[in-house]
Image: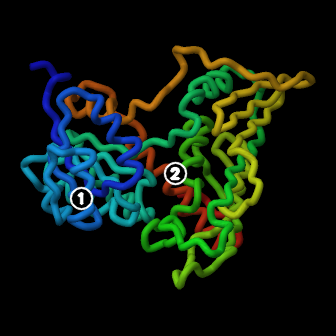
Amino acid sequence: MTATEQPIRIGIIGAGGIVKSRHMPGLRAIPNVQITQVTNRSLASAEAFCREFAPEAQAVERWEELASSPEVDVVWVGTHPYMHAEMTCYALQHGKHVFTQARMAASLPEANQMWEASMRYPELVTAICPAPQGMHGGELVKKLLAEGAIGTPHQVLLHSFNDAWLDAAKPAHWRQQSDLSGIQILTLGIYTEVLQHWLGHIVEVEARGNVVIPERAGVEVDIPDFVNVMAKFRSGIEATMLFSGVAAHAPTDKLWIFGSEGTLSYDFNTDDLQLGKRGGKMESLTVPTELQRSWTVERDFIAAVRDAKAPRPRPGFGEGMNYMRVVHAVWQAMDAQAAVRVV
């Protein structure tokens, strides 16, 4: 039996919408991958998931039982961020490869626990679900910047707006509750991951944010409804990043990178990448086939599990720490109302 045919048994902890809509189709497309156990918020919901998506799997009541089961090779964590660290470290201690849903963790110390645990077990594959934003054209963006298509980049503007939280009558979303989401704010972590992949590390931030609707159906909201971030990259590039969940008639999620010789823009909803030279017009670019990236997350992870020589999937826990440090610093900057170094 070749490495590509080796059976892989997966246990799913947290079988929510992302697991159903994104990960299950990817896993089902890989030969000899079997879902053996599933645990969810309740045994009944785990059983319902198995009936619809994985009839071969056993519904399990306790996640610890799944994460230590001899019938599981890979633990697929699909829970809210506040559970990621405990589950990941436990699974690694029991010899399981671990894939965890983004964002990495509820706090920087918890993310650090995951990172350190992964280094103690280097033979085990670990990865975080990557941000799909910019996946299609990101390699071309990096190539254009490296070739000096806009000269020396000096300024960045990014906005990510929606009105999902504008209706005060709607119940609180789990992403608005720090006991479930931790320090994660809107799409801040997602776009920090993307921009650092394209532009290098952020080393300093200033931030202001606010909770517009502080209570929803008796639940206190303690995650900002909007946040404005000023960020400085190690290269000297300065970025303004604006995020909101209470913006009516919101524009699309979009990025502009301004340089000495022109501008790059990226529409994250349409993957429209545009380049404009100084004095000329912005024009859309076609991403060459060889530079296009598509969603191969599940395939890449399983390939690494089957073959130790295969590339490790990205982002790894070390890369996750890079954006967790920035998100942590944003909270510090909001509290201090001052610039904070990212450490």
Question: What residue do we see at 67% from left, 22% from top?
Answer: 144
Q: Does residue 120 appear in the picture of this structure?
A: no
Q: Position of residue 191 (x, y in %)?
A: 59, 47
**Image mark for residue 46:** 1
For badge 2, the amino acid type reads Tyr
Q: Kindly state the secondary structure of the residue where label 1 is placed.
A: helix
Q: Which residue is mark 2?
A: 323
**Image mark for residue 326:** none
In the rendered view, would you say 341 is above or below 266?
Answer: below
Q: Could you tell me if the residues under marks 1 and 2 are in contact, i.e. CB atoms within 8 Å? A: no
**Nearest the camera: 265 or 312?**
265
Q: Give the CA separation, mark 1 to mark 2.
A: 32 Å
Left or right of 253, for residue 288? left
Q: Position of residue 115 (x, y in %)?
A: 34, 52
Question: What residue do we see at 54% from left, 69% from top?
Answer: 176
Q: Kindly state the secondary structure of the residue where label 2 is placed.
A: helix
For badge 1, the amino acid type reads Ala
Question: What residue do we see at 21% from left, 59% from top?
Answer: 90
Q: How many marks?
A: 2
Q: Quadrant of the N terminus?
A: top left
Q: Residues within 10 Å of mark 1 (few under 14, many from 20)?
A: many
Q: Earlier in the sequence, mark 1 or mark 2?
A: 1
Q: Residues within 10 Å of mark 2 (few under 14, many from 20)?
A: many
Left or right of 150, for residue 305? left
Q: Position of residue 192 (x, y in %)?
A: 58, 48
**Nearest the camera: 15 or 304?**
15
Left or right of 185, for residue 9? left
In the rendered view, would you say 317 is above or below 226?
Answer: above
